[in-house]
Amino acid sequence: MPTFFFPALDTDNKKDLLEEIYSSNRKLMLRIAEGILKSGCAEDAVHNAFLRIAKNIEKFSSISCNERRCLCVTIVRNISIDMLRKSHRDKMIPWDEVNEPIRHISAIDEILRVERLSDIERCIGMLEPALRDVVDLCLVLEYNTRETAALLDISHEAVRTRLHRGRTKLKEMLVKEGITHV
């Protein structure tokens, strides 16, 4: 197996810490990534998460094991969600699979729809992290509230509460930005 040089891992203590984090959190991180990605990309997400952890290993040395675990879960969850978004963005329908051309949507309507979606995504990104994660999973990625609770390892009621608060704040932001009206 090839070894890679990480300038951040310049001491044995840092290497040992990364190995400890890896051995104690890898299975959980893989389960989180598989739950989000539902494909063979989960290993890639975990690998990318450990690359990010290795680059920031100094931050992990000063926190408790439980905080490390939470941080590892957050990192792999965010990476997995980013990978899922990218895969959705990259999916294109081959021209021969299109049965009927779409004639009723004008180019202007499509441009406005895409602009509106990017404005909504920007507003979702401005939500506080706890609300943003739930809104992303439920509204953007279309997970139900029970699946979201399992992915985030929080109660079903917490997901429902955060989703309600997130929707309310998102609606307020969209009205304030002039993207939609009440």
Image (cartoon, rainbow, N blue to C red):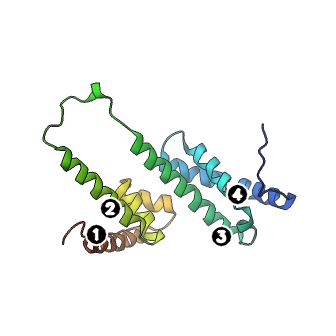
| Mark 4 crowdedness (10 Å alpha carbons): few <14, some 14-19, many ≥20 | some
The earlier-in-sequence mark between 4 and 1 is 4
Residue hosting label 4:
55
Residue type, numbered disc 3:
Glu
Between marks 1 and 2, how big is the CA–CA gap? Answer: 8 Å
Q: Residue at x 45, y 64 (%)?
A: 133
Relative placement, left or right, of 115 versus 18 is left
Residue hosting label 3:
67
Which quadrant of the rendered structure holds the C terminus? Answer: bottom left
Residue hosting label 2:
119
Between marks 1 and 3, how big is the CA–CA gap? Answer: 34 Å
Where is 53 relative to 107, above or below? below
Q: Position of residue 128 (x, y in %)?
A: 45, 72
Residue 96 image-quadrant placement:
top left
The earlier-in-sequence mark between 1 and 3 is 3
Q: Position of residue 74 (x, y in %)?
A: 56, 62
Looking at the image, the residue that sits furthest to the left is: 104
Between marks 4 and 2, how big is the CA–CA gap? Answer: 32 Å
Residue type, numbered disc 1:
Leu
Residue hosting label 1:
174
Residue type, numbered disc 2:
Asp
The earlier-in-sequence mark between 3 and 2 is 3
